[in-house]
Amino acid sequence: MAKLRRFINISEDIFVIRNLIGAILQGVGLAYLVPVLLVWFYPDEIKLSVYFAIPGVACILLGYYLSRHIEQVEDVNLRQAMMASAFVWLFASFVSVVPFMAIAEMSFIDSYFETMSAWTGTGLTMMNHLESYPKILLFWRAWMQWLGGIGIVLVALTVLIRPGVAAARLYRAEARSERILPNFVNTAKIIVQIYTLLTILGVYLYYINGMNLFDAVIHSMTGLGTGGMSSHDLSIGYFHSLAIETITVFLMILGATNFTVHYRVFVNRSLKEFFRDIQVKAMLIFLVLIIPLMTFSLIRFGHVGPIRALRESIFHAVSAITCTGFGISDLSKYPEADKVLLSLLMVIGGSAGSTAGGIKLIRVALTFESLKWTIEQAILPKGAVIRKKVANYEFSEEEIQEVLGFTMTYFAFLLTGAMYMMLRLGAKFADALFESASAIGNVGLSVGITSPGLPPDVKIVLTLLMWIGRLEIFPTLVFLVGVAMMLPRRAEK
Amino acid sequence: MAKLRRFINISEDIFVIRNLIGAILQGVGLAYLVPVLLVWFYPDEIKLSVYFAIPGVACILLGYYLSRHIEQVEDVNLRQAMMASAFVWLFASFVSVVPFMAIAEMSFIDSYFETMSAWTGTGLTMMNHLESYPKILLFWRAWMQWLGGIGIVLVALTVLIRPGVAAARLYRAEARSERILPNFVNTAKIIVQIYTLLTILGVYLYYINGMNLFDAVIHSMTGLGTGGMSSHDLSIGYFHSLAIETITVFLMILGATNFTVHYRVFVNRSLKEFFRDIQVKAMLIFLVLIIPLMTFSLIRFGHVGPIRALRESIFHAVSAITCTGFGISDLSKYPEADKVLLSLLMVIGGSAGSTAGGIKLIRVALTFESLKWTIEQAILPKGAVIRKKVANYEFSEEEIQEVLGFTMTYFAFLLTGAMYMMLRLGAKFADALFESASAIGNVGLSVGITSPGLPPDVKIVLTLLMWIGRLEIFPTLVFLVGVAMMLPRRAEK
Ligand SMILES: [K+]
Ligand SMILES: [K+]
């Protein structure tokens, strides 16, 4: 630790990070103001709007104050970017709790759990009887999820895109595998447009298939944002509609696709770009492999009819691998094999560069390729060169090591979370692993462990898992090490 | 595949592998003759000795015939070494089934399961009511385990140590991380002497603490060889003796320690060498972390008294991490948290260069270090050099990649095995994972899935897991690819 401290200028760190946080805080403030517009549709909720307007204005003012020297920020190094990025999620969730505490009268821990779950696009919830809450509060959750999915990343990047700032490095903290595009600001604009367009398309499709407008907006936002927070306790299952389930599957897959693929599809006006993408292919392969096993187990051990079993398996498999978390039936009654297969999909996760969580498909694909290379190396004569290419991108040994190391670390946190729930609650392994995978993968599916009745320490563990998972672990560790280093030391020369 | 075939001279492969197999076959033949000596102690079993004498002589003659040109083998490449090594375990188990089929009248599948379990040092068994079998058969199992633990590796190395043969490469297939010592033949002799000496010490300690001589020999051989096959259905639990349990813990830890450490302890006459070893340290750290959690869970969810819970936790934790498989109580009644913690220890496994299985402690230590390096890299300024050293050995990026890749592949096989048992038998996840970890880690602990009543396909899956695990996966994959390439192709030019 002392060795590391020598390399670091702490006052510079604090300056850079404070300015970045200020910029983000202004974004959260603006986000707070949007639900206020809902009063136009639901005038009886007007008295609730103060719980959004006041924190919104406060965030904007505080953010403006903190970031008033942002033009002096000349370069952001990787450590600072990671620390800022880790802190942003902690802090944005912190300032977003007001409506939950004020309107729903939830405890601080429950409210913080809820906002962390919303901003990270997880969708686990401390709220029961969703239908009984004001529309403005349900919208606030879905709106955070929609923004959390793509907005926060893009806002941060747009703010940071200024001469001399190495934006790619912060982007690296969020989605390590995709190279930044040459002109990021323009690309970001187009991506936001695509995201908005697809959301509107989702609202339209839901609406013409029987949803009311409010539900259509909520589910299109949290479906495309792979957040999964619903306005109904039964989630998508509430609607009992194959059409609505199909639209949802479609939205979830779009949300879990790398947005540079969407960009290329739109710019080149060709759907080929979609199916050519290695991560899309990998997702489809995993679904094709796992869905039949899930269906088999559901028929044999869950005693569900074959058609219904297939329908549930497809929906929940897509919901799991895209890290959305919508459901159409009670997963706590599923056979253990189905729970484990869903956990596996949640651990794999969606595409890097999408709104989804998990280990990410590109890393899993690379791991499989890595095995192939090792076998080839043993079979080929010494000195034969194997090109370590995945999807036209040649990986260095160091990058491969990083990917595999990430995966191992992910497993370590996943298991630690599951073991905590087993020892604390006496939960079954399949259930504890499921819930841990759901939290760290920002998925939001539940077999019933997550509920308002949980002991506070378990709620905190789940909240930490959501935070660690959203940031792909390393930034949170760098953050913790960084904070430890910033603490003043006695007698250090 | 066609690309790979170009590099390979198949007739040379067959020549080399045939000669290696011949050499190994002579070793198995000699092994067969040893149980015959037991007739001196148990004269009423004299008629059973033919089932050992005849196959023994047959193996020696066939082995001599196959390896008659062994002096012409000039160099063994890595691929050939891996393939021979993978084939040896399949074949040695095949030729060892005679006594089980003839004396115990077991089916071929059950007998093959038993011999694979014995040679690989696993200890899962298809035999009930062990006390009812002839002594010579129980000795045969334990003797295979004792030899399988260290003998086969050393025999292969001794045979292969001749001018021009790259023995280190075959050794690499068995224990990748430890470099071969300068003068291997001498080292091998000393290691065999140490192994024998420790076994005799074990017999003596067991005997003076109340075991009869036969039991003392069996348990000392399968304890030090971390094989775990007992002469009693209740395993070590049969003796109800704290002293015997303590001796067993001691033997298991010795068996799961890198034998070059034993070599250094003996040569330098210093116990410091033992505690200085990184793998020994890692094993003790894992035990210190896991045993309290197991004890806690056993008291809280298993309703076992604190002293008894601690005693069982220590014994089973050591049995699991050393991959021995001895037990002192019925694990099928354990709480799921204890099953999962034991599975974790079985997956970690013992030291590379020992008789134990699992991922191996050196790989796990390297994985943890690798995480530390990644965080340091993010914190330090660009260009700062991090020395990737574990226990004074600096690892290259490529070696790190291989270790992490191995671990991922191990998990893939582990999960596939568990999922197979869940879908085929409707087993609980904790149980299926436990049994899969026990088979692939060559441990032999069971929560009751393994039994003579299993469907044949599940027996085959478990047999394959034992084989794959003993060879550390890659040689078996190279073997399968190699066999596929040796098949004659139509219309290939
Ligand atoms: K989600
Ligand atoms: K064993």
Image (cartoon, coloured by chain):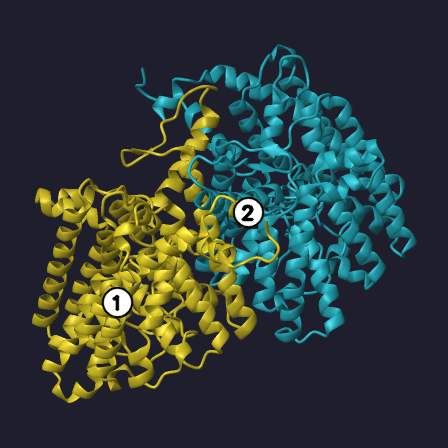
Chain colours: A cyan, B yellow
Residue B131 in the image, given as x and y percentages of width and height: 24, 83
Badge 2 amino acid: Phe
On the image, the x and y values in percent for residue A285 come to 66, 53
User: What residue is disc 2 on?
Assistant: A368
* Foreground pick, A215 / A282: A282
| Residue B29 visible here | yes
Location of residue B375 by image quarter: top left
In this rendering, the label closer to the viewer, 1 or 2: 1
Q: Is disc 1 surrounded by few (<14), some (14 to 19) or many (20+) residues within 10 Å? A: many
* Viewer-side residue, A491 vs B27: B27
CA gap, disc 1 to disc 2? 37 Å
Q: Which mark is residue B28?
A: 1
Badge 2 element: helix
Letter of the chain that mark 1 sits on in the rendering: B
A289 or B79, which lies in front? B79
B382 w.r.t. B469: above or below: above
Query: What's the chain of the residue with tag 2?
Result: A
Inspect this view and state whether residue B341 appears. no
Label 1 sits on a secondary structure element that is helix
**Mark 1 in CB contact with mark 2 (< 8 angstroms):** no
Residue in the image at 23% along x and 48% along y: B161
> In the image, which disc is placed on residue A175?
none
Q: Residues within 10 Å of mark 2 (few under 14, many from 20)?
A: few
Q: Are marks 1 and 2 on the same chain?
A: no
A383 left or right of B227 in image: right
Q: Is mark 2 within 8 Å of ligand 1?
A: no
Q: Identify the residue at image location x=10%, y=62%.
A: B201
